[in-house]
Amino acid sequence: MVFQQTTLDLDLTVKQNLRYFARLRGMSIREADRRIDEELTNFEMRERARDKIRDLNGGHRRRVEIARALLHDPEVVLLDEPTVGLDVPSRKAIVARAHDLARERGLALLWATHLIDEILPGDDLIVLHRGRIVESGPMTEVIARHGGVSLDAAFAQLTGRGEQAGEPAGGEGEA
Amino acid sequence: MSGIVYLRAFNGIILREVLRFLQQRERFFSALVRPLVWLLVFAAGFRAILGIAIQPPYQTYITYDVYIIPGLIAMIQLFNGMQSSLSMVYDREMGSMRVLLTTPLPRWFLLVSKLFAGTAVSVIQVYAFLGVSAMFGTVFPAWGYVTVLPVLVLTGLMLGALGMFLSSTIRQLENFAGVMNFVIFPTFFLSSALYPLWRMRESSYLVWQICSANPFTYAVEALRFGLYVKVDPLSLAIVLGALVVFLAGAVWGYNPSRGFTARRGGPSD
């Protein structure tokens, strides 16, 4: 699970944060350290393991949180607007990394977002509007059913054109 | 789920709290300075005025600084209990409480672990304080430093549970600051921390009654006896009873389907 707000202890190091989580999941310290090393390497954060969270930028904190959510090898990962407040390159990197995870490990990611450019053509999509599911299916099919132009246009059609914000959230799953 | 999983989670929660505490130098410093100011300024002044008659567990006349130490120890633990709870309120606002509460272990277990974690921190503070006060000449029987430990754990848990119960009912940080003032000071002053109960009774029967009903008084007395390698069963029993009550309140308060978090629609909004 990855929350919208950061949930790391700022004054502890990356590794201390991850070990805390691993212990909460009942992992042995050896297993925990092995998985921490693996995930940090995957997220290119290994050299930062001894840094305090406070010294990391937003993008790196997010990476640590996603790495943390993967430590105990879950089958499903829930991410609640994980890219909120990040700069464009960090956001892109995290979105790409998430898609890699789904492809490489067969992980299911439920990714809630307002930023519909984070959804890629192969993704399964659920459109929520005011708490109701108004559409679901693979992205390309959703576009085809609603104008066939772009996801932007389809989304606008589904949620009522020009409406401010509303309550849309794209769910993205990849088996 | 096997016991080892519980044990690992328990260790994890304790370790996090201790690590966080060690990072926060100012907190350690202020935890130490506060009782020392009382000891060195307040007690030094009263030493001349106030003689303490022989009363259990003391076997001779004692000076006021010796009398006041158990109360100051309890004050450290009271402050720490409130501060741990303050950090729980903060955790809840900042979201790291969610990491804890989404752990697939029973909530009561997580809260009890958290309580032990806060107690561990308070015990570190107390021994640091006892060390410094010994350097200033206020010493206890050597074995007292050992026998006070189990009492410290019990009183630490009780005062931590009090803070936890309060924090479950409080939503915002600012509110909590108010509670600190309305809880900590009355709790400390209306107890046997600064004056023996019999002396209170001489001056005001009402105040004496309030002090006698205050669980903090019994925490202080239990510590006082513990420091002299003695046991005060009544105090210990009352502290234990208060612990059970406060803990039950906290577990109830942090239950998402009942309690205070439910009424306010959960911690997130």
Image (spheres, rainbow, N blue to C red):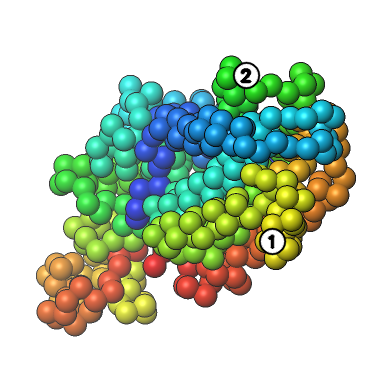
What residue lies at 31% left-to-right and 35% top-to-bottom?
A54
Horizontally, is B249 left or right of A8 in the view? right
Q: Nearer the viewer, residue B67 or B107?
A: B67
Q: Nearer the viewer, residue B218 or B255?
A: B218
Does residue B246 sit above or below B68 in this rendering?
below
The residue wearing badge 2 is B137
Residue B64 in sight? yes
The x and y percentages for residue B95 are 42, 53
Amino acid under label 2?
Gly
Chain letter of the residue beneath label 1 in the structure image: B
Amino acid under label 1?
Ser
The x and y percentages for residue B145 are 73, 24
The x and y percentages for residue A169 are 30, 67
Horizontally, is B85 left or right of B226 in the view? left
In the rendered image, residues at marks 2 and 1 fall on the same chain: yes
Distance Cα–Cα, label 2 vs label 1: 33 Å
Query: Residue B204 is drawn in which quadrant?
Result: bottom right
Rate crowding at label 2 as few (under 14), some (14 to 19) or many (20 or more) other CA atoms within 10 Å. Answer: few
The residue wearing badge 1 is B204
